[in-house]
Image (tube, rainbow, N blue to C red):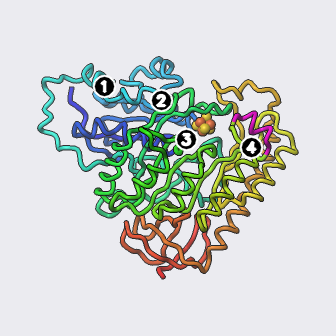
Amino acid sequence: MLFPKKLHIVSFGCQMSAADGDELAQPLLERGLETVDDLGHADAVIVNTCTVRQHAEDRAISYIGRLREWKEQRPEGLVVVAGCVAERIGARIRRQFPFVDLVVGAKSIDRYPELLEEALRRRFDWKKENRGAWPKAGPARLATKSRSLPPRSFSSGGVSGRYQRPDAAAVPEAYQADGAPVSAYLTIMRGCNYACTYCIVPAVRGRELYRPFGTILEEARRLAASGARELMLLGQTVNSYREGGRDFADLLRAVAAVEGIERIRFMSPHPHYLTARMIEAMARTPAVCPHLHLPVQSGSDRILRRMRRNYTVRQFLDRVDALRAAVAGIEITTDFIAGFPGETEAEFEASLDLVRRLDPAATFCFKFSARDGTEAASFDGRIPEAVIERRHQRLLQLAESRRQAHLEAQVGRTVRVLLEDGRHGHTEHYVNARLEKAARPGTIVAAAVVSTAATGLRCRCA
Ligand code: SF4
């Protein structure tokens, strides 16, 4: 049986999942496989799954089902299913899709190279394998954005969903003409020590694990050398990072010192770890973008307790105020959930009030949906779907009006756009920007904002 040569990777879900997809590809890339965008041209496929939203899980399962035919046409093909769905219902996947060669759950990602090796050994004749005939894997391409389903920008309109930002919105690939990434993901930790009652992540990803400080810097340098100008540090509670006496603030400063890195973003921070040290690091490290996506979820203290978010509205606002005082011009974006079990009309109104007080540049509005395996799935006080829908629509409308106001306030100003392709990029506030004339990808240009657009801003080089 011939060893595969062409690898197709598909990631469902959030940025963490996208970054994991690239990491999962690495052992195969090191064995000489090349990535292809078209499944029809592939003879190996990695399906990296996400279970945070039921929708993402359903899409992943349906995709795996469709691979049956693909596999029938090429019995030598290799199918790997990884990630959170694999963790949650791995046994079912093995039963339902016996053609899958390897199912590896999110908690086993550290053992993945070893498990893959075993699966390959079962399938292919090692003695006949001639590694020398294969090209060496190219420059490190871990955690770049291009092979995943990218998240919708914070500036996108009509944002709606369940607990994670919607995926698969077609933003242009963050690649320069020579194929080097302009904007790259860099995973710094996995798992979560919290236990929000609506969230499946701790069950499928386990407790927090922090990547060694030095390894992160090594990868940052490698990505910078391959052309990255912006790094998005990723982790479920990214700012809880700590390792060897150093914390997230230290990491921000260290990554900013990597030559070639001009912008740093991170996702998703937890309000609890928005400490004075972190705020100071953000304020004093020019490479850290003046934008923070800080999920709040509800404007009601009672609902926040029921969600087990471990902060009150007042504490959340105090931290944001401190951040705004320290970092000039910072924009805040956030998440809300509408229709959490037991949420009264007054508590929902409190969420609307909080949108007004917080004045986020963009808000991701999610409808509560009970996920099997979470505590909230068994909570009493379920809100009827029609009510959830109505609350969600009201939240969306308010969020959209705030978003438009923030965009319009930019018109006439000069923004700095990191160009990801000739005409498209992001401002320092992570707003999509489109230039009237093309410029070189990978450069940061000063651009005058001419008008707003459905997806962000239209700009002209200043
Ligand atoms: S902090 Fe809460 S919502 Fe975020 S990953 Fe952990 S449990 Fe889930």
Q: Tell me if I can see residue 112 in this picture.
A: yes
Q: Which residue is mark 3?
A: 237
Looking at the image, residue 215 lies above or below residue 127:
below
The quarter of the displayed image where residue 227 is located: bottom left
Q: Residues within 10 Å of mark 1 (few under 14, many from 20)?
A: few
Q: Is mark 3 within 8 Å of ligand 1?
A: yes
**Which segment did they paint magenta?**
300-308
The residue mark sitting in front, 4 or 3, is 4
Of callouts 3 and 1, the N-terminal one: 1
Q: Secondary structure at mark 1?
A: helix
- What's under tag 3, amino acid-wise? Thr
Is residue 398 on the magenta stretch?
A: no
Q: Which residue is mark 2?
A: 65
Residue at horizontal 24%, vertical 22%? Answer: 121
Labelled pair 3, 1 in contact (Cβ < 8 Å): no
Residue at horizontal 57%, vertical 70%? Answer: 457
